[in-house]
Amino acid sequence: MSFGMFAALAVLAAPLPAVAQPQMPYGWTNVTVGSGGYAPGIVFSPAERGLAYLRTDMGGAYRWDAAASRWMPLQDGNVVSSYMGVESIAPDPHNPAGVYMAAGMAANTPAAILRSADRGATWSITPVPFSMGGNEAGRGLGERLAVDPNRTATLFFGSRHDGLWRSDDAGARWTKLIAFPRAGLGKPAPRQTHGGVAFVLFDSSSGAAGAGSRRIWAGIADPGAVHLYRSEDGGASWLPVAGPGADMLAVKAAIAADGTLYVGYATGIGQSDALDGAVWRFTPDGKGQDITPPDHREGGILGVAVAASAPGTVAISTLDRYKLGDTLWLSRDGGEHWDDLGPRSRRDITATPFLLHEGKGADFGHWITGLAIDPFEAGHIAYTTGATVYATGTAGQALVDWAPWVRGIEQTAIITLISPTSGAHLVSGFGDLAGFVHDDFGVSPQPSFTNPYLSNTNTLDYAGRKPSVIVRSGSLYANRPREASLGRSEDGGRSWVPVKLPAMGHPPVRADLNGEAAMSVSADGATMLVATPEPLRSRDGGKTWLRVDGLPGSTRATADKVDPARFYAVDDTRVLGSRDGGAHFAPLAGRGLPGDLSAARIRNREQQSTLIASPFAAGELWLKLGGQLWRSTDGGASFQPVSGALQVELFGLGKGRGQTPDLYAVGTLAGLRAVWRSDDLGKHWQRINDEGHQWGLRFRVISGDPRVVGRVYLGTDGRGLFYGDPAGEGK
């Protein structure tokens, strides 16, 4: 990339062009979990009490609305997937309505600086030529984006790969600072990243209002001899600042009103490579002192915060302190003495019981990189973890009471879901959080996907005529012991028993332990089929297993939802069927289908099935072949195309007003990628999301409800789980 000025016209986020199909107004509501994902950073606004911003790694940014007492999502109208990974966020230090954001998911995806004059309600977007990594390793570094408190039109941004950049027109145009000593390591190799310029901080005491700050600090998280630099002339030249050693990267920092700088160091950029760390205090002239707590001993320091209302009050937090457990230290004398808050902390997770999903009590947390002290109240401290955001108002008391500060945050990846014909209307499969039975969409669910506990639920199926029977397949974090990756429930997902397969092959191995084998269940719940290399069938809940004849290895079977004797499957050239409860499969006529069916192949364990059986009629099948849907009403003997001009990515069925089901889909029609509904078997489609409900267009799964007309469930990759009802209808 060439040095010098990069100019980009700021473009206002605008609605996409309208399409000929009418819009059907829908109301969209998150199904409550209460956070659930990694939020790498949190910042308070110094301009207004009760104003804070949170950035997440794939679910966009949020603003705390004190009047509403909830976090407000700020990017639900965004259509660029990459912008949902937020690299850094910076509120204007004087104007509470102003806020800036650096957005970009990874090195090979689009990146931009976003600017808002209305607290993030709307954004102006400036695409930039430097890559970001909002969902890459090191996303807890920062903050990389900084606003000069003495001239708020001046912003600096520390990039991962391309050095330090400056804007003097409130983020509309950016110039690379060629005088900065570290130009960046350039575009990384695939699946790799750099730490780059980890943070930038202006010293407000070094300048005058309107004239700009003279002293600027920048930390480096790339290998090298120097990891901290200081400028005394507003960024025109830079001086190296000695620190703890070449192996310690400068990853996080905070600056006090008197110009004292506190820097957190780590031997890695995170999230799981910071074996050691330190915290140093620097005077404005660059003289440093090691103030690491004596009992630190392990892990990096990736949280650093100062209290604006209480001089000398500093907080730090650890990352990757696996043996001793991550914690937070508080000092009231500039780091001369530290108080470990971990041993005297209590947690109330009543509002988010899902945090018990791993079968243990809620601990201090992991991946702690976001740490902030309220500038108006020193006892109000918040920190982020890989699963939630904790806050306390009692940091100065003998017992520190923490509670999740998450109302309004839904930052999860939904892999799969089902809406059974009775019982709970929604059962979900999540990434990292296993999955839930959602009895009340407005309440965080109790964890129930245990025995076996699996971090990811990859597939779910229910017995159409006995929907209390649910089966699931899943996978666990790498290097964690597991006894089973399949489970069966007889009570609608509230309790489970593990389903184990026999070892097979030479040498004999269990093919079900890697999470690749999906399981399906017959309409009466009596038969289970597992898509192992040698497909297996059980009629006694998994006690004994028999080989399935005629079904290719690792082929996922679909059970008829009404007739317990029928199963179906598809391979590259044929639709297959069983009329004897899955014991034997044979080719079906499949009249009307093209000869090549390879586009229907399931290519990964988290992919939704391309063959769905209707819960409303025996023998009714729906097949997605590439972007086209096909329907059969005679058990696979013949198929008719039903999706018209819509190029379908995901689809599901729901209750219709007449005899035919409503059809829901994510797909593209007339150039518009959106969420669609058809109530006439695909002859006409109506868009049911709108410009304010785009969620980065990051969709994973969709299904209608077999009992509620018009109800649709939509799983996203980063903004959680939604249910939608026609405006003015639904529950």
Image: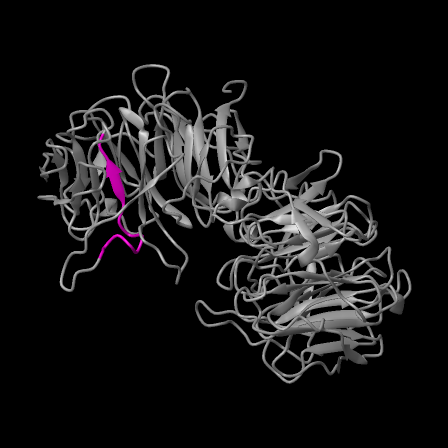
Q: Nearer the viewer, residue 125 or 133?
A: 133
Residue most extreme to the top: 658
19 or 488, nearer to the observer: 488
The vertical placement of 8 against 245, above or below, is: above
Q: Quadrant of residue 415?
A: top left
643 up-or-down from 297: above or below: above
What x and y, as percent, mark residue 284?
84, 75
Q: How many marks?
A: 0
* Vertical comparison of 467 with 692: above or below: above
515 in magenta: yes
Q: Position of residue 581 (x, y in %)?
A: 14, 33
Please state if 317 lies on the left or on the right of 204 as rendered.
left
User: Looking at this view, is 326 or 56 the one in front?
Assistant: 326
Determine which quarter of the picture holds residue 654.
Answer: top left
Taking 114 as reference, is 427 left or right?
Answer: left
Q: Nearer the viewer, residue 19 or 591?
A: 591
Residue under the image location 52 percent in, 53 percent down: 82
* Horizontal side of residue 346 vs 44, given as left or right: left
Image coordinates for residue 127, horizontal then vertical, percent: 60, 57
In the image, residue 670 lies at what x, y percent?
41, 37
Q: Main secondary structure of the magenta part?
A: loop
Quadrant of the snapshot with the N terminus: bottom right
Q: How is the image coloured?
A: one colour
Residue shown at 50%/59% (left/top)? 109
Specify the segment rendered in magenta.
510-522
Q: Residue at x 48, y 43 (%)?
A: 697
Q: Is residue 147 visible?
A: yes
The reply to whether residue 669 is visible in this rendering is no
Q: Is residue 546 magenta?
A: no
